[in-house]
Each structure stands twice: as structure tokens, then as C-alpha cells.
Amino acid sequence: MGWLSWLCLLFLLSTTCQFNSTCSSSFNSSSSLSSGHLCHPEDSSALLQFKNSFSISNAPYYSYSNRTISWQKGKDCCAWSGVTCEKMTGHVIGLNLGFGGLQGNIHSNSSLFFLHHLKRLNLSYNDFSGSPISSKFGGFVSMTHLDLSYSNFNGPIPSEISHLSTLVSLNLSQYTSPFVTHVDTLSLNRIVQNLTNLRELHLAYVDMSSVVLDSFKNLSSSLKTLELSNCDLQGKFPEIIFHLPNLRLLDLNNNYYLTGYFPKSNWSGPLEMLDLSHTRISVDWRHLARNFKSLRDLSLSGCNFVGSYLAFLGNHTQIKVLDLSYNSFGGQIPWSFFLNLESLVELVLSGNNYVGQFPEVDSNSTGITSLYDFSKQQLVGPIPRHLAFLHLYENQLNGTIPSWLGSLPSLKSLNLGSNQLSGNIIEFQFHSLKYLCLQDNKLHGLIPRSIFELENLTVLALSSNQLSGNIIEFQSRSLIVLTLDDNKLDGQIPRSIFEFENLSDLGLSSNQLSGNIIDFQSRSLSLLDLSSNNLSGNLEFEKFSKLQSLRALNLSFNHLSLSFNHLSNNTWPQLKLLDLSSCNISEFPYFLRALQNLDFVSLAHNRIQADIPKWLLDWGKDSLEFLDLSHNSFTGTVGQLRWKILTYLDLRNNSLQGELPIPSPSTSFFFISNNQFTGEIPPTICSLSSLQILDLSNNKLSGKIHECIGNFSQSLSVLDLRNNKFHGVIPGTFSKGNVLRSLNLHGNQLEGSLPPSLLTCTELEVLDLGNNKIQDTFPNWLESLPKLQVLILRSNKFHGDIGNPKTKFPFQRLRIMDLSYNRFGGFLPTKYFEHLTAMINSQEHGLKYMGDGYYQDTVVVTIKGIELKMEKILTFFATIDFSNNTFRGEISSVISKLKSLKGLNFSHNELTGKIPPSFGEMSNLEWLDLSSNKLVGDIPEQLANLTSLSKFNVSKNQLVGPIPHGKQFDTFENDSYRENTGLCGFPLSKTCSSHQSPSSSFQQEDDLEHGNGFDWKVVLMGYASGVVIGISVEYLVLSNGTPNWLVKVVGRKRRRRTVEITQRRA
């Protein structure tokens, strides 16, 4: 159970009885009040048989699980806990086993049904394991109060319940998972018509999707409570229900298809609690305010309100609970309204569009301390010291958390998560707080000591902030949920966390925690996530075997060494998720074979050397949804995959071979790259109609690409078949409406021309067709693809002129364009250069990469003649490579407008004319290669302005004159200028005559020892890891070129002119 589910349970249990007289009075009788007669022996025997038909759970939420301990043979059952007897006869008339921890089935022959005199029966909050609600419950003819709620009953509500004509209170509410209780129109009609004394009717989570809503028109006029939440009611709700003369509680929430109108007639109803959340019932705020003057609790969450209606509630100062969450309210929170609701105890405004900051204490106010809105320059009201619940989750609030929130003496629940709050977390002065959620903000600093001292704290959620420092010992022994993931916390995990007895969810992932993992004491632990920390040590997996409630366990990406000795075969019966990635595992964990309920398994990034066990392909075939065995050393072949509901399969980076296995049609993500699979792609690939990512790259697959590849899945986003041996033509079957984002066919033997159906790929961002045998002219028609960012056509047989654009905004998002090693000719496409908007002024900043969490795009670029694979493509990375073609003519100065370019390569063409001086304006340029052309004139001095330029090559041209010096030009080697007989100056041995001396406006800086000199290997390493490295940030390497550690160098590295630059080469 996730922490949010736990939260719901906790507060459901604490608030269920608020408006439910069943809780407060119906089962309040005890045996101490009925000791006038000994228990009837038949009833005593029936109770003992009933007790013995169940096991008893000691889970913490079963607060009365010890109730039946006092039930012992030979003792008066009227003195047993939860039992009430009739004084005169000794017959059992009341049985209260709510929260009793009962686990098992109630059968129709249960001894419970021998208790014929029962008037009150409470079996709520137990686990009856999908038992049907027996028709025998209709045999308790004297029953006045029946509560079977939230006890995992299953199936239809029997019409025999309608025989309980004396019923005053009926509660059949249930959970929706894993079982479903339902009722049909006929049964509901009988219940409504026959139970004329009914005052309380609770049917939450009972499926009523088939019920005719007019059935409710016959409800008893004495009805005070009607709870129909989460019932899938559909159609128009009878307006007459609002007019029931005694109705005080009406709960219709989460019936998404329930329509109707709020009464508009002038009348006054006694309603105290109204919940229409997540329905489509039209609410008239004026009539709501006028007719329900007794309203104490109002919930209108998810009703699509826009604007402000709150003024209509201005006179309802008696309101204690107000929930307006998940609407479309915006602007600043109207604090002046809320703070003047004198009785307000609970305020929920989560999931709106509120902005702005909290009001602050007015230091100038006198008397009662007031709050001041500095943005509006006005007082907004007194500090709400009676406030117990404040939930503002999922808004756009900014600023800091005000200190006055920590001074509220009654505050029990505070949820400010998923906003944009910054600064430090406040100190809390009182110990009333039970629930604190500040996750997903921008908070920083230490976790305040007062939080660790909150003795009643049950839920603490501070994940996804920037909190730092140590986690200290907690004073609370009641914590059930603790999530501190995605922060910067360090130090060891405090012992108190391991000793919590009721802990259910623990999330400490993505921090910098260190030390060892010791035994957890909580037997209720359901979610345990310690991933992505610095935890270390040898860890026997048996340590977790006592945690029988575990549903999710994640130990991935630490410095642990796991072993699997002494494990039993019946461990973790409820485990659903197991992530042991990067845990230094060297053997396959065969204990998995006994865990048939797992749906998520990851053993990636380990050292497992073995064949994939044959049993694994059959194991979990009805439950497994996610399997990651990537980055190991698995060998052998993979047999037929039998997983029926698998959605994610990752076998990347192993040594698997044989024919390509094809998973089930349910698969959405299929990664099998970097193996040794051979043969053709089986035609069953065409059945994967749900596929979103298909990565078969870097294998030895051959044959033709199936025609279905273009249209077998309308969900396909990534198709990566690079570096195989496919031949034939690219399929022309890309269908209209596809969502293909990345198409990578690099490094195959494909021929023919490009299929025009690529134009249907309007979501395409990456098209890499490099290193094939494609024969075609330049595909101008691709210029209309609105999202294309990467176009790689290198090393094919493209030919002809590039020509001019055919559209007004060609290639408007293109950032990487590689046409190298083809047979293109004619003039450089100046008209295209004028319109490459993304290269002219990139709006991207920071280290962001193309792709998503499952797949990162890659690209091969050429720097200094070296083909370099970039494992990730930075979103601001821009380069043009037209090298090794037959382009002719002059280089236009238009290119200098491409201010975002990191690299420009026009080498090995037939270009003439001069190097444009305006190239000196391309301030982001890091490499420039114009070598092997027919360029003339001098090297413009303006190029010395390019302070990021790390590689420069103009060799094999006809350049003359002095080489510029200063800044980056003092770092370039002889090779940058060779075979230009007219050039002179450093670093060439040919000196310039006096009238040729290079001029420089740059002041020379102090030389540094050449031991810290610049090595081209370090620049390439930076690009290989996806990080663009300018001259101010270098990798220092050992003499053999092996990376040692990363050093950020402040300032530029300079050399003495007499030092040989190539000295450091290995």
C-alpha cells in the first residue's frame, strides 16, 4: 500500500465517525452494561466456533485485534469483549468486532447465523477474503444496526437484506480492490421500500452502475445519513433527495457520470454535511448558501468551478470543513474570506491554480495578532489558531513557508506539497502535528529539529526538495509513512528508523546516505526504497525475510554486495516490485522462482554470468509487467517468451545470441540492443500493436525490414535498428497519425530512395540514416516536418544540388545536420542557412537531453577527423557537417548568423574565396574545420574572438599571411595550418616579415607550466559523455590518456611559445 493510500486510511479511520452515529452510539454498548444474566450456552458455543474459523492479524491498523483473546470456553460470554447480552435471557444481542483483525471466509453455514437474537452486528474493517454477503444476514429479524463495511466482501448484495424491516442503520460500504460488491435495481428497490425505519444508509464503493436512480425516490423520510460515494452512479440524481426533511449527511462524491441540479426553490434543509465532489451535479451557489444554513461540512472538489463564488458563503461562519480542491480557482488565495470563517477547522484548496505568497504576521498590529498581505498592502484577518487541517497541495504558491503556521496549537495535518515554495522549513512549536507533506518544492537547508521531536507524527513527506544535512533520531514512535527521497541528505540512517514498529512506507532514495543496513523491526513495512545512495557493505538478503508485508523493495544503485544464502521458498508473499539493479550480484537469485506475484523485477547493472534460466520464461507469465536484465553478462539463447501482460522488457548489453525473441502483444517497451542476435526479424513483430519503443540496435540482424514496421503500432515513438545488417529499402508504410519521434537506421546496408511516407511522421525529431547505401537527391520535402531536430544522412550515395527551400520556414527546429561523405555538389545552400531558426538563437539552456526516461537519443559526430558517439544529445547542441562532398563556390557570411553552432565542418569540398570575417561573431563555436578546400586570402583576425574555439583546421588550402594570435589561437598545433605555403607565424616555423607581423589587441597572460597543457583527448571525452566542454573546463588525464578525475580549471591554460604542444601525447 502506497503512502497516499495509507494517508487515506489513517484519516478515513479518524474522521469516519464524525457524522456517523453508528460509530458513536450504535455499537457503544459493552458487556459491562448487561451482566444481569449468564450467557446462553448455545450463543457461547456459536461465538467460539465463529472465532475459531478465523486467523487473527496483529497489523497496527487492526486496533482491536486482541478483542477475542477474552473469548474462552467455560467463561460467561456476556463478559467477553465486544459482546452485549440481553439482561433477562442472556441471549447475545450485540456483537462488535470492528477492526478485529479477523482473516478468513464467512460461509453460509457459519455459526454466526445461529445468533438469532442479534440486534447490533459490527464486522467492519476485517478481511473476509472475498466472501459473498450471505443471504443468511437477512435472517436476523430483530436487527437494528448492521455494519459489514470495508471487510473485503465480494459479489452482489442479497435482496434478503430487505427482510430486516427493523433496521435503523445499514453500512455495506466496501473497498473496490481486489473485490467488488454490487447491487442491482431490483434488490435496491426492495431495500429502499421495506426498510422504512432506516436512518443511516452507507453504500460507498458498492457498484451501482446498472441501478435506475429513481429507486432512491422511495427512501425513508426519517433518513439522516446517505452515503453513496464511489458507486459509479450514472444519470440524473433525483432532486427530491435534497428535500428529505431529516437528511443531515449526503455524500455523493466520485460518481463521475452523475448529473442533476441543485434545488433552486426557497426552502431550508437541515443538511450539515454535503459532498458533491467529482460529480456533474450543477451547483447554484446562491441557493446553496440560502437553503443550507446548518451546513458545517462542504466538499465540492473537482466540480470544474472557475472564478470566485466564495462571497456567497460569506455569512456561513459556522462552516468547519471546506473542500474546494481540484477546481480551476486561480489568482491569489482570498485569505481574508477564509480567515474570517470563525469555526473553520479544515481547509482544502489543493489542485487549483492559486499563486502568490502566504500572508505574514503584521508586526505593527495591536491586540490580537493579525496577518498582513504585503502584495495587496492590507490586513487579511487573525491567525487561525483553531485550524487543524490545511491542504494546499498542487498549486503554484511561491515564497517561503510563514512562521505562523508553526504556531497553530491545533494543527494536525499540513500539506503544502507540489508548489514552488523556497527557503527553509519552519520550526513547529506544538506537538499536535500528525501529518506533514512538503514534498516537490524548492525547500533547502536542514530538516528542523522540531520535526524530529513531533511525538504524534504519523506521516512525513519531504521528498523532491533540496534539503541537506543529517537525519537525526525521531521522537515519534507512531510513524507510518516517511518519504525523504530526492534530496541531498547525508550521513547514516538513524537507528530509530529501523526500530519503528508500525512503519509502512519508507522512501530514502536519491540522497547521499551512507553506512550499513541493519534489521528493520516493523512487520508492517510495505514499501522500502533505499536506492541511489552510498549505502555499503555485504548484505545477506535473508535480512529482509521477516518483512512479510513487503510489496516493493528497491536497493538499487548503492555500493552493496548482495548474496542470497539461506533463503526460504515462501518469502514475501505480497511482494510486487523488486529492484536490485547495481547491487554487485554475481549469481542469479533463484529464490525469485517462489515469488509468483511479482510484476516488476530489475536485476540490471550487475555481474551475473549465466544463461537466462528456462523457468524464468514461464515464471510470472500471468503477472509480470516489467523485467530488466540489462547490463549483465547473460549468455546463450532466449526461448519463447510467454509473459502475457508484459509491458517492459530490457535485455540490453548482454551476450545473448540466436534468433530474436518476440514478446507478447502487450509489450510497450522492448530493448534488446548490444547483443549478438542473428537472423531476420520474425514476422510476429507485427503483432506488437502497443509498442512505444523498439530498440534492436547493435546486433547482427539481417534480412529486410518488414513492411509492417511503419504502421504496426500507432503508439510507436522510437524505432532504433542501427548497426545491424539489414538490406533492401526503407519501408514506405508510415501511416498518417503516427507518433514516431526518433527513427535510427544508421549503419546498415539499406538502398533505394527515401520513402515519401516519412512526411506523415509529423512528430519526428531524430532521423538518422547514416552509413547506408541510399541513393537519392537531397530530400527537400523533409523541411516541412515541424519538429525535426536531427538529420543525419552521412556516408550514403546522395547526390545533386541541395537547392533552395520550398516552404516559408524550412527546418525551423533543426540543430544537427550531417550530410558528410556523400556526392552532394553545387553551391552551399545559403537560403537554408538563413532560416535555420534553432541554430540562429537557441532557447535551450542547461543540461537537458533529447529523449525520455526510457530512451536517450544518440548521434555520431566528427571532430578533428574522429567519429565520436554522443551517448546523449544535449538540447542546445548544434552542428553542421557538409564535409567530403563536392560543394563549390564561396562561403556566405550568412552562416555567421547561426550563433548557436558548436561545430561547423565544410572540409574536403571545392570551396573557394575567403573565410568570412563575420565568423568571429559565432561566439559558441567550439570547432571549425575548413580544411582541404581552395580557400584564399588570410585568416581573419576576428576569429581570435572565438574564446570557446577548441579545434581549428584550415589545412590544405591556399591561405596566406600571418596567423592570428592570442586566446585560443595560441593553443592550436601545426596540423591546423599545414599545406598553406603562404601562412606564417606561431605555431609554424615560418616567421612573418615585419610588414606581416600579426596584430593582436589581446593582452598576453602569464604563462603556465606546460604540465597542465591542453590535450585533445580530454575535449573528446567531454563530448562523449554528453557534456560540451569549452576551454575553461577540462578533464585532466594521466600520461597514458586514462581519465583520473575531473578538475574545473578557473581561467585559461596558456603555454610558453617554446613548448612543443604535442609533448603530452602518449
Image (cartoon, helix red, strand yellow):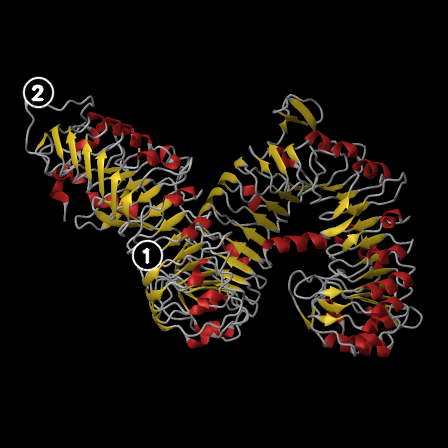
| Residue 567 seen in this snapshot | no
Q: Name above or below for residue 603 compared with residue 766.
A: below
How crowded pointer 2 is (Cα within 10 Å; few <14, some 14-19, many 20+) is rated as: few
- What secondary structure is marked by label 1? loop
As drawn, is 1037 to the left or to the right of 457?
left
Q: Which residue is drawn at 79% across and 73% down?
A: 134
**x and y percentages locating residue 798 in the rendered image:** 28, 49
Residue at the limit of the structure toward the right, as seen here: 88
Circle 2 or circle 1, nearest the eye: 1
Q: 849 or 981, which lies in front? A: 981
Which label number is shown at residue 842? Answer: none
Q: In which quarter of the image is residue 605?
A: bottom left
- What secondary structure is marked by label 2? helix
As drawn, is 879 to the left or to the right of 141?
left
Which residue is the site of mark 1? 752
Q: In which quarter of the image is residue 317?
A: top right
| Mark 2 to mark 1 CA distance (whole Å) | 57 Å
Q: Name above or below for residue 463 compared with residue 721.
A: above
Q: 653 or 809, which lies in front? A: 809
Which residue is the site of mark 2? 995
Quick one: quadrant of the N terminus?
bottom right
As drawn, is 346 to the left or to the right of 778?
right
**Please, what is the three-letter code of the amino acid marked with disc 2?**
His
**Please, what is the three-letter code of the amino acid marked with disc 1?**
Gly
**x and y percentages locating residue 558 in the rendered image:** 40, 56
